[in-house]
Image: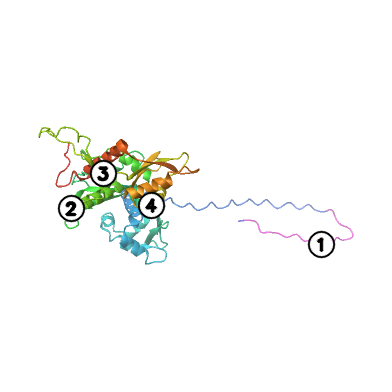
Amino acid sequence: MSAPETTTTAAAAPAETPAAVETPAAPAVAETPAAAPAKTEAAAPLTDSEKTIKKQLEFYFSDSNFRRDSFLRGKAQETVEGYVTIATLLTFKRLQSMTTDPSIVAKCVSDSTTVTVSEDKLSLRRTHPLSSKDDTKYRTMFAQLIPQEAGLDQLRTVFSSAQDVKVELVRMRRDKASKQFLGSAFVEYATQKQLRTALEYEFECQGVKLNTCSLEEFLFAANEKKANSRGGYGDKRPYDPSSSSSSSSSSSEKKEEPVEYTKGLIVKLVKSADVELDRETIRPLFESHGKVAFVDYGRGDAEGYVRMDEAAGAAAAFGALGEKKEGALFSVEMLEGETELSYWTKIKSNQKSLYKSRGGKRGKHR
């Protein structure tokens, strides 16, 4: 206890003042050290099962899923802040299989940068608003020949095996009526560059080598197949390199089929130095001259190809973009002759591989 504070008041001095008596100094009061701040217990690290819950919750609110999940988006739009109650999330079967405790759900994402917990810890929302720009199609791979027994978690592991890639979403394709897995899936990567990396990688699942291609290529092949089944797709001209050879080959020999394609559709582009280029930039530059069927370009590549829907559109684009201009993002040239045939041969080969597993044919386990 500190000594009481004393106040000294000076009095008037008498005519004769006796020798002053020295008053001993008051003992020094020891300083009371400042109270140490109360220690707060650090939150216990998440267990493995809680990390799995966190991963699942962050997936629900990720760009990849949230953009397509109309139910979840609808629930978020019911409140101004965009919150979805944890009670609603616990009706989702996958999360329900992990926990039924709302407090555990709130705990698992308390430090998440993707998901924000409400003050009452009863609701969750996205931390950042959903971007209006959607480049999903340019970051997605199609894969097939996947064994029927494969599960979602196994496929995420398989498609993450390429170097420096992050799988955002795996959508297993199922029959609408029976819900049976069809042996193919769409795999969304974090960036276009990661997709290009994945397309160059050989994926295997349970000993089966998988066929892969970009989603754009898959959609183009599907549309072309549909158009062909209706009786034609543009002005196709067959190219048969063996047309001058004798047709009396042995029936036991497999005759190479001629590559059928429409001439004058492919415009090659070569990126200028020190320029950032991507499909979203390229497409509108060509679309102003005609319908673009496919942009075969990966961010960072030195060159790429644009496949127009009609030859007239390709010619118009080449005429407009072929002019030498200072500051141009790229130069262009039309594919002709052997280079055009070589490119189409590659395209047709990829398209055939997409459909070779149809009709019950499956990849064999090694």
Secondary structure found at label 1: loop
Q: Nearer the viewer, residue 130 or 99?
A: 130
Q: Residue at x 43, y 42 (%)?
A: 330
Residue 221, x across and y down, in percent: 25, 48
- Sooner in the amino-acid sequence: mark 3 or mark 4: 3
Q: Amino acid at mark 4?
A: Glu
Secondary structure found at label 3: strand
Q: Amino acid at mark 1?
A: Ala
Label 2 vs label 4, nearer the camera = 4
Q: Residues within 10 Å of mark 4 (few under 14, many from 20)?
A: some
- Sooner in the amino-acid sequence: mark 1 or mark 2: 1
Residue matched to label 4 = 287
Label 3 vs label 4, nearer the camera = 3
Q: Amino acid at mark 3?
A: Tyr
Secondary structure found at label 2: loop
Residue 273 part of the magenta-drawn span: no
Residue matched to label 3 = 261
Magenta-tinted stretch:
2-19
Residue matched to label 1 = 11
Label 3 vs label 1, nearer the camera = 3
